[in-house]
Image (cartoon, helix red, strand yellow):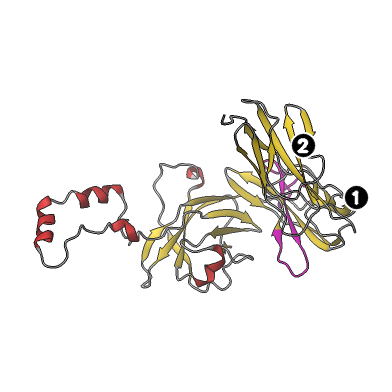
């Protein structure tokens, strides 16, 4: 049974609609006189970011543990129940259709052994009892100590479709800016039929003494990828994972792998991960995330229309960079690169561009 949420608007109106006489009786009693404490102060936790994808003939679910920092997931006392129901294929996109009866397929309790992501920041679960051309609905229930359901997560509907085939002829080579990967995209799915939808790719990298990590924040198109975030002379393994998106569900195929790729001996540092701009008095302040390891400094670039100029004559050591040569109401884009510690101060690639309209304060 799902317990009512004390912060629900309808319940809130009923509670505060109790006759004033009842409040008077409370005030007439013995002890300290005070107003009742809000029931919403101890509202139960809810899983709000349940996500799903199809990979290697199974549905992979992942969610954050509510109310705890990512690094303290193992210390959480939450208990979870993974709920599943099958949806008629013709009703897979029908939001008005009745929700089928759900049943529990997995119960997960602390210390979550075998259910943590590699970085131990989230809970993950893989459901292998799925079939092609079927649709499934999942939710995660938060349980109390007795095993009763307290709250339900956001629902996710997953459509299981054939995955794209394996990328072919994966090659890797050191370049001036990093390691360049190249491959031939698949043209058929895992059953040898034409692929339904556009094939995209996710790139994963493995360094010695580190877990596999995703190095592409979003899937990429095409058949080339340059990885600038590598260490000089270090050796890496790579996986190129094909995927298609079908009605909001990511369908991932078998990866192509290449092992023991050595980075070039001298590399410029990669660009900052994030660049943002803050308006000031008659100027714009360009900020960025600094590298954890020491670099020779940073260069700042500005783009206005098609014109790109470097604003820094020499590398600057720390953000921000204050651009005073801007005009009000013009739209500008800014990017930042990093330079190495070598004598020639080799410059790396540009970061992503940050856009802003110069609505400066006078």
Q: Is residue 233 above or below residue 343?
A: below
Whether 312 is among the magenta residues is no
- Which mark identifies residue 318? none
The residue singled out by tag 1 in the image is 344
Name the residue rendered at 64%, 36% in the picture.
284
Q: Is residue 359 above or below residue 271?
A: above
Residue 275 occupies quadrant: top right
Q: Nearer the viewer, residue 198 or 79?
A: 79
The residue singled out by tag 2 in the image is 311
Residue 212 occupies quadrant: bottom right
Of callouts 2 and 1, which one flags the residue occurring earlier in the amino acid sequence? Answer: 2
Element under disc 2: loop
Whether 199 is among the magenta residues is yes
Q: Nearer the viewer, residue 328 or 61?
A: 328
User: Start and end of the magenta stretch?
Assistant: 186-213
Element under disc 1: loop
């Amino acid at each position: 049974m799902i317990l009512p949420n004390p912060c629900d608007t309808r319940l809130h109106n009923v509670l505060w609609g109790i006759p004033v006489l009842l409040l008077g009786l409370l005030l007439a009693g013995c002890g300290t006189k005070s107003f009742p404490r809000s029931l919403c102060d101890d509202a139960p936790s809810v899983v709000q970011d349940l996500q799903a994808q199809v990979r290697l003939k199974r549905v992979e679910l992942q969610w954050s543990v509510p109310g705890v920092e990512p690094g303290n997931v193992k210390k959480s006392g939450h208990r979870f129940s993974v709920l599943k129901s099958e949806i008629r294929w013709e009703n897979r996109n029908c939001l008005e259709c009745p929700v089928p009866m759900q049943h529990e397929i997995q119960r997960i309790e602390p210390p979550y052994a075998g259910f943590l992501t590699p970085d131990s920041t989230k809970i993950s679960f893989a459901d292998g009892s799925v079939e092609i051309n079927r649709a499934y609905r999942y939710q995660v229930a938060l349980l109390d100590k007795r095993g009763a359901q307290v709250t339900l997560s956001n629902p996710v509907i997953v459509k299981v479709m054939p995955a794209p085939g394996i990328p072919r002829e994966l090659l890797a080579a050191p370049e001036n800016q990093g390691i360049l990967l190249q491959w031939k995209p698949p043209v058929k799915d895992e059953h040898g039929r034409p692929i339904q939808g556009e094939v995209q790719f996710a790139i994963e990298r493995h360094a010695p003494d580190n877990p596999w990590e995703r190095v592409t924040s979003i899937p990429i198109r095409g058949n080339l990828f340059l990885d600038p975030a590598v260490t000089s002379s270090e050796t890496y393994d790579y996986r190129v994972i094909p995927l298609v998106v079908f009605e909001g569900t990511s369908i991932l195929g078998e990866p192509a792998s290449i092992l023991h790729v050595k980075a070039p001996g001298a590399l410029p540092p990669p660009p900052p991960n994030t660049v943002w701009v803050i308006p000031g008095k008659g100027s714009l302040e360009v900020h960025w995330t600094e590298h954890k390891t020491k670099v020779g400094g940073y260069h700042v670039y500005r783009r206005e229309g098609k014109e790109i100029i470097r604003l820094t004559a020499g590398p600057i050591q720390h953000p921000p960079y204050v651009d005073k040569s801007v005009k009000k109401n013009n739209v500008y884009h800014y990017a930042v690169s990093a330079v190495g510690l070598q004598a020639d101060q080799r410059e790396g690639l540009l970061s992503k561009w940050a856009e802003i309209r110069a609505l400066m304060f006078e």
